[in-house]
Image (cartoon, rainbow, N blue to C red):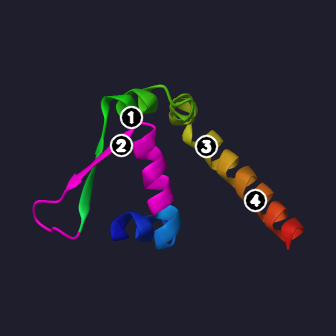
């Protein structure tokens, strides 16, 4: 859990809730860690794998991968500029 927590930059409670939601929806299974009884291992279930296969973001990734490098650089610059505007407007 601490690895997930550190990777996401979240505290313990939100990570536990997110994992529990994934377990309740059948996307992830938990099992005891044979190397460390204090921790659990998370396994992606068949439903979780299928859900990832159908993730609409994968199509966006495919489209981005197909862009020529110069167009990808321009897109990155545009998104960065928009993000700066949104952040400065929010503050």
Q: Are marks 4 and 2 in contact (CB under 8 Å)?
A: no
Q: Disc 1 to disc 3, how far (Cα)?
A: 30 Å
Q: Are marks 3 and 2 in contact (CB under 8 Å)?
A: no
Residue 82, position as x, y percentages in the image: 79, 55
Category of crowding for the residue at label 4, using alpha-carbon neighbours closer than 10 angstroms: few (below 14), some (14–19), many (at least 20): few
Q: Disc 2 to disc 1, how far (Cα)?
A: 6 Å
Q: Are marks 2 and 1 in contact (CB under 8 Å)?
A: yes
Name the element at disc 4.
Answer: helix
| Foreground of the two, 69 or 47 | 47
Which of the two labelled residues, at mark 1 and mark 3, occupies the earlier sequence position?
Answer: 1
Q: Which residue is mark 3?
A: 72
- Say left or right for 63 vs 47: right
Category of crowding for the residue at label 1, using alpha-carbon neighbours closer than 10 angstroms: few (below 14), some (14–19), many (at least 20): some
- Would residue 33 be counted in the magenta stretch? yes
Q: Which residue is mark 4?
A: 83
| Foreground of the two, 48 or 67 | 48
Per the rendered image, the range of residues in magenta is: 16-38
């Amino acid at each position: 859990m601490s690895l997930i927590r550190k990777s996401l930059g979240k505290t313990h409670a939100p990570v536990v809730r997110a994992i529990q939601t994934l377990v309740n929806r059948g996307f992830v299974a938990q099992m005891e860690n044979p190397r460390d009884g204090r921790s659990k291992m998370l396994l992606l279930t068949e439903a979780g794998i299928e859900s990832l296969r159908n993730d609409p973001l994968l199509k966006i990734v495919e489209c981005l991968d197909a862009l020529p490098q110069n167009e990808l650089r321009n897109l990155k610059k545009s998104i960065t500029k928009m993000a700066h505007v949104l952040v400065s407007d929010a503050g």
